[in-house]
């Protein structure tokens, strides 16, 4: 031990960093990061982050939004999430033009709608770009309507059924020719196969796959019976569908050749879920009332269904999403 003037010199005491202190510091940093993240990106799934929706959607509104003059919007409108602007899908036609549900829109080429005036009630094919009528597909009696309408993924063929009948005639028609059409006594159409040769239909016996050429039916396996009132949403590609309940959606992958469904995963719902629809890239969009947010889910072969992102989607109360134009 060294000495100075006979006194021993002790080296300064070394402070040691214990494992316990490291744990407490790491915990404090984690809490701080999570707190800041929640403050800036509040959502049901903070770890996913939040981003702006960059595309546009078509909505059905019930007097829930007013324009610059204070006149309420009512009916079908185009909505731009980035600017939060609403605009009518104005066709210039007299009377009321109402698209026939979420399946009425093709891939940016056409849409199908009921055109109603005091003197007529018609099912009409419209050009999506110009909003002008291409032709009248069918004239119906007053008070009657088309209940189901769907497009093939390539936008060249559509199928539709009128409402109010137990076994309505299902018509398959070409968008290019009014004479190129066939019809069958078949259940209601849900969606086309990717190549447009088959149609998934729903009847009292559940789901079946119908040949678009001759109307022959093959019962779908891999799923229990699906009621006529059960909501089913179809992916634009025709590769998958989701069966919706009050608590979630079951995502299935379709094998058209084998006429089977394979369970891909479950998308849980919160009590404030308002709408669910597939986007153009086959993601599943779940819009939640209040807070202006939506969740998107994707499917990856071998990995199943996973949460993808939280989107800022400030839609008005009571809005119904008919179609996602782009995303």
Image: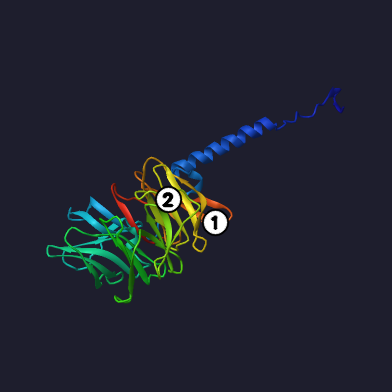
Question: Disc 1 vs disc 2: which is toward the camera?
Answer: 2
Residue 153 on image: x %, y %: 42, 67
**Quarter of the picture holding the C terminus:** bottom left
Taking the image as shown, residue 228 lies to the left or right of residue 221, namely left
In percent of width and height, residue 263 lies at 51, 51
Question: In the figure, is residue 89 to the left or right of 314?
Answer: left
Q: Which mark is residue 260?
A: none
Q: Residue furthest top?
A: 6
Q: Residue 22, image x and y in percent?
A: 65, 34
CB atoms of marks 1 and 2 within 8 Å: no
For the point 27% across and 69% down, which residue is it? Answer: 125
CA gap between label 1 and label 2 equals 18 Å
SS under mark 2: strand
Query: What residue is disc 1 on?
Result: 300
Count neighbours of disc 2 (C-alpha within 10 A) and say few if under 14, some if 14 to 19, many if 20 or more: some
Mark identifier at residue 243 = 2
Q: Residue 34: where, in percent of width, then height?
A: 51, 40
What number of labels is visible?
A: 2
Q: Where on the picture, by quarter, is residue 122? A: bottom left
- The local secondary structure at tag 1 comes to strand
Judge left or right: residue 197 versus residue 158.
right
């Amino acid at each position: 031990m060294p000495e100075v003037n006979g006194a021993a010199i002790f080296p300064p005491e070394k402070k040691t960093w214990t494992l316990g202190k490291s744990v407490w510091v790491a915990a404090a940093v984690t809490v701080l990061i999570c707190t800041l993240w929640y403050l800036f990106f509040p959502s049901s799934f903070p770890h996913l982050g939040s981003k702006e929706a960059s595309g546009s959607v078509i909505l059905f509104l019930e007097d829930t939004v007013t324009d610059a003059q204070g006149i309420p919007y009512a009916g079908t409108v185009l909505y731009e999430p980035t600017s939060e602007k609403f605009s009518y899908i104005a066709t210039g036609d007299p009377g009321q033009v109402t698209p026939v549900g979420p399946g009425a829109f093709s891939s940016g080429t056409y849409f199908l709608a009921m055109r109603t005036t005091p003197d007529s009630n018609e099912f009409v094919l419209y050009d999506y770009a110009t909003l002008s009528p291409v032709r009248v597909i069918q004239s119906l009696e007053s008070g009657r309507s088309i209940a189901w309408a769907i497009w093939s993924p390539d936008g060249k063929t559509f199928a539709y059924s009128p409402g109010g009948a137990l076994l309505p005639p299902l018509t398959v028609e070409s968008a290019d020719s009014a004479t190129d059409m066939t019809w069958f006594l078949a259940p209601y159409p849900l969606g086309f196969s990717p190549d447009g040769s088959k149609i998934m239909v729903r009847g009292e016996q559940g789901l079946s796959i119908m040949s678009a050429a001759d109307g022959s039916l093959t019962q779908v396996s891999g799923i229990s019976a699906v009621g006529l009132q059960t909501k089913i949403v179809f992916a634009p590609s025709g590769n998958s569908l989701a069966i919706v309940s009050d608590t979630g959606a079951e995502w299935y992958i379709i094998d058209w050749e084998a006429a089977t469904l394979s369970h891909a995963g479950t998308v849980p719902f919160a009590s404030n879920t308002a709408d669910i629809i597939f986007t153009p890239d086959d993601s599943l969009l779940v819009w939640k009332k209040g807070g202006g947010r939506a969740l998107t889910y994707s499917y990856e072969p071998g990995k199943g269904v996973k949460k993808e992102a939280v989107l800022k989607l400030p839609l008005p109360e009571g809005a119904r999403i008919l179609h996602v134009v782009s995303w």
